[in-house]
Amino acid sequence: MSDHHTYKLIEIVGSSPNSSDEAIRNAIAEVGKSVKNLEWYEVVESRGHIVNGAVGHFQVTLKIGFRIEGS
Amino acid sequence: MSDHHTYKLIEIVGSSPNSSDEAIRNAIAEVGKSVKNLEWYEVVESRGHIVNGAVGHFQVTLKIGFRIEGS
Amino acid sequence: MSDHHTYKLIEIVGSSPNSSDEAIRNAIAEVGKSVKNLEWYEVVESRGHIVNGAVGHFQVTLKIGFRIEGS
Amino acid sequence: MSDHHTYKLIEIVGSSPNSSDEAIRNAIAEVGKSVKNLEWYEVVESRGHIVNGAVGHFQVTLKIGFRIEGS
Amino acid sequence: MSDHHTYKLIEIVGSSPNSSDEAIRNAIAEVGKSVKNLEWYEVVESRGHIVNGAVGHFQVTLKIGFRIEGS
Amino acid sequence: MSDHHTYKLIEIVGSSPNSSDEAIRNAIAEVGKSVKNLEWYEVVESRGHIVNGAVGHFQVTLKIGFRIEGS
Amino acid sequence: MSDHHTYKLIEIVGSSPNSSDEAIRNAIAEVGKSVKNLEWYEVVESRGHIVNGAVGHFQVTLKIGFRIEGS
Amino acid sequence: MSDHHTYKLIEIVGSSPNSSDEAIRNAIAEVGKSVKNLEWYEVVESRGHIVNGAVGHFQVTLKIGFRIEGS
Amino acid sequence: MSDHHTYKLIEIVGSSPNSSDEAIRNAIAEVGKSVKNLEWYEVVESRGHIVNGAVGHFQVTLKIGFRIEGS
Amino acid sequence: MSDHHTYKLIEIVGSSPNSSDEAIRNAIAEVGKSVKNLEWYEVVESRGHIVNGAVGHFQVTLKIGFRIEGS
Amino acid sequence: MSDHHTYKLIEIVGSSPNSSDEAIRNAIAEVGKSVKNLEWYEVVESRGHIVNGAVGHFQVTLKIGFRIEGS
Amino acid sequence: MSDHHTYKLIEIVGSSPNSSDEAIRNAIAEVGKSVKNLEWYEVVESRGHIVNGAVGHFQVTLKIGFRIEGS
């Protein structure tokens, strides 16, 4: 058994019409469909687009870290 | 008709006693009273002041982008 | 009486299973148990760990500023 | 006569379907319609949107500095 | 009465042949001629031009924050 | 139908012996061979190598964002 | 005797109604009341609040480094 | 034959109980199992976790660049 | 039992005449004499002083995170 | 023969009335008059001055790396 | 006559026991002894060392730009 | 005798096939051949190139500070 792990970080933009936190949750849920061993996320950027003078979607860019299978 | 648009970014601090997202919504609502064609925002800074050991107001600094009229 | 104040900034990571804003509130509440004169906070980093493909805890790193007693 | 000047910086996004430099020129031309005494610009960000797998528009964010009239 | 305020930040370069602090004071004085409710400034950049091997002018770039009237 | 999209960002270095903009176009063309739904790019770094005292290749590092299929 | 020292950095905001440098001096004087072995400072941020259209206080955030006693 | 290459950057966290450099070597060895044409790395972040008051693992985040096959 | 923890970050400069990693280990060992529950570190800065044209001491600035007792 | 090289980086501002890329080429050409072994450049800043409401000169700040002779 | 100039930036730390501005002036005076055509400076870092609980020297790191002779 | 010193910073990339620290030592040794009064270094960037799936050379970019002779 190895004495160390290796992790990969991918950069994802989640969005939500409701809240910044839901944008984070949506990004993780989408990635979780195809990637296993998700361990942590880091917020890189928080922004959004505006429709009719109000927030249309909150858009949060995350780095999501996961352990490389077998490492 | 022009083949390109021009946008201006203004920097605004919104605040709210309730949540960071509401501070964002308040900033956009205030700017929308006098500026048209708001298209997106970017969070620049997130902070707040503390009153009696609890958050008094969430304060979120945004850049808000809008298309320059006629461009 | 002095014509100026001096403040100290401490760096704290708050966490919450529920929301980013609650992580901020939890950090301030914890610090408030032992430090007086808390005046403001600044968000330094926003991240979290992921459990079973969903957010386990939101983790928000803050700088919290307080007036040095007697200054 | 004053022994100093004061300048203001505004943040503008220029765009062009042709080149990054033309995006810069377009931004300055648009601002020059309503502001006098433009003196310098600084590139803040360079990006673009992609249409059908190719650059649709180059988008360059600039700070543009101008002397405040009468200063 | 609203339970929150909204602030705008503008970016200004003040200059002075005498000192960095006077460049800050000059920038604020110039802005104060046309804007009310100035509340704080943040130094963004400190530079200057050199004439005959000595400082010609200290140039300090500030963000100046003011409360939006009526907010 | 979902009320939100999710995007992925990949980091690519394009190069060109002719110009910075062509390096951007080359990067996008290469990625477009295997990835669909490309929507935007952001320039992260601009550099190059020098051969015989002149630019050998312009090298531009981009983040390229695309919508995750089905999101 | 050890062949190395260890230092701690604390973050302090000094203020002064008169000058940026005096804000630095005030911060160091205040910290020196309770901490020994102060060795250096680094300016992290320079800002101020504005009263009646003029600088009320210069506020300078410093990191101050001191050797840990006995190290 | 093309007159230019295209490269992709991936972000990896290597770890080692022994040293920072070994964490770099471990990350590259792990990626090399599945990716060809690795050409360079850039250190993005250096950190570690602490176990019983000593370094448990050195953790180094790298960007690793490789030439896209066929470009 | 609380459903969350709170952590504090302190900034420390470790040094060593031998290596950067030993500077990290020395910093953690020194802090561990007086602080419990150390959990992780982040390298903030890496530098050194030079004596007789060679490295005298490697100096590494770390943020060290520990769980606040009772949180 | 040594098993390693040493490089020096110098910081240069090139300018051109025509394009950003030509400003880069001009900087490298000027440096190449007196320095050998130029190997790469990195763009640090891109700006320009404005004359009569149009770009007067594009000004690009570069770091230029060259191998130290004999290393 | 060329239609463009080329500038070089050098990085200098000036110091003064009296003030930050004097540290800037001292750095420029020292460089002016051996370099001609100095045109501007940019403050990169502001720090100092502390002696007996007070500022020993203000230390200001500058980039100083000068036109390359003949360009 | 002057009451202050002036220092110059130069930017150097050292390399080593063996370790990051040796890359630092190599850079300083090379500079020391032609420059006197070296006093400190700061790590600016840490990277390397990869040969056959392993580190070929560690490459560390340093700023090296030295006192200007006679200052």
Image (cartoon, coloured by chain):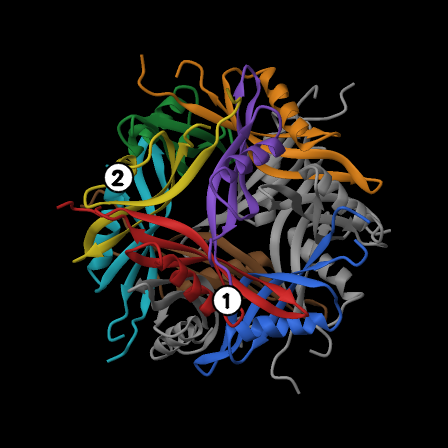
Chain colours: A blue, C red, D brown, E cyan, G yellow, I purple, K green, L orange
Q: Residue at x 22, y 55 (%)?
A: G50
Most extreme residue toward the top, as rendered?
L1
Residue situated in front as seen by the camera: D11 or K43: K43
How many marks can you see? 2
Question: Is any atom of residue K36 visible in this view?
Answer: yes
**Residue E48 in the figure: left or right of residue G55:** right
**Residue E12 in the figure: left or right of residue G67:** left
Marks 1 and 2: which is nearer the front?
1
> Label 1, on which residue?
I1
Q: Residue at x 39, y 17 (%)?
A: L71
Most extreme residue toward the left, as rendered?
C1
Secondary structure of the residue carrying tag 1 is: loop
The amino acid beneath tag 1 is Met
Where residue D5 appears, as percent x and y from the top left, is: 27, 48
> Label 2, on which residue?
G30
Chain for numbered disc 1? I
Labels 1, 2: one chain: no
Chain for numbered disc 2? G
Residue G12 quadrant: top left
Where residue K57 appears, as percent x and y from the top left, is: 33, 27
Q: Is residue K46 above or below residue C14?
A: above
Distance, label 1 to label 2, CA atoms, is: 39 Å
Residue situated in front as seen by the camera: D5 or A14: A14
Q: Is residue C19 above or below residue D62?
A: below
